[in-house]
Image: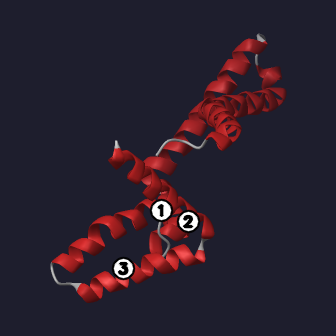
Amino acid sequence: MPPKKTNRLKRYVLLWIWRVQQPGQIFNIIMSAINMTLLVNLYMKWRFENPYVGILLAFGTVMFALLTVAYLWDAKAKMWHEQIEVSVHKNPYYYHKMTAKEIVGYKMQWVPWMRKVGLEEEAQFWDSWCYEQMSLDPQLKKDVEEILEWRAKATQR
């Protein structure tokens, strides 16, 4: 389905937010390391005659510590697995809600197929479930209708 024209400004702003976030993660790590280095350097500067040696040594130590924690977090603790599980289970569409594409898919493919092979009770359940989902969410109903209108226009060509 083509993107809506009314959301162009919103999409443009979100696109730039996404573009800034991607290198922002790396930039955040480097800036954190520099910040910690300069803080630690205040306590270390009496040890080195050349201040740049102390700063580079502190920066290397801080980066090593950050990368070690990152490796342990990722490879050993596998925290990202739990993060994905939590994000999936917090998603209302995982358990009981349906997206517009799912409703259209069920109404146009699965429900007719179930009726054709004799699973009338199952087809009735899914048909009523889709209707219930659309009655609970007016925006979902509007999205389903837009998809069906778009499909009807596409098949007339």
**Amino acid, disc 3:** Trp
Q: Are marks 3 and 2 in contact (CB under 8 Å)?
A: no
**Amino acid, disc 2:** Leu
Given residues 45 and 16, the one toward you in this image is 16
Residue depicted at x 81% and y 22%: 45
Given residues 22 and 99, the one toward you in this image is 99
| Extreme residue in the bottom direction | 121
Task: Residue 131: give x, y in percent of width and height.
Answer: 47, 78
Task: Residue 9: give x, y in percent of width and height.
Answer: 70, 37
Q: Which residue is mark 1?
A: 100
Given residues 109 and 150, the one toward you in this image is 150
**Amino acid, disc 1:** Ala
State the CA–CA distance, disc 3 to disc 2: 16 Å
In screen coordinates, is 150 left or right of 58?
left
Is residue 66 something one can see in this rendering?
Answer: yes
In screen coordinates, is 21 left or right of 70?
right
| Extreme residue in the top direction | 50
Q: Are marks 2 and 1 in contact (CB under 8 Å)?
A: yes
Residue depicted at x 35% and y 47%: 156
Q: Which residue is mark 2?
A: 140
Q: Quadrant of residue 60?
A: top right
Residue depicted at x 22% and y 72%: 113
Is residue 77 something one can see in this rendering?
Answer: no
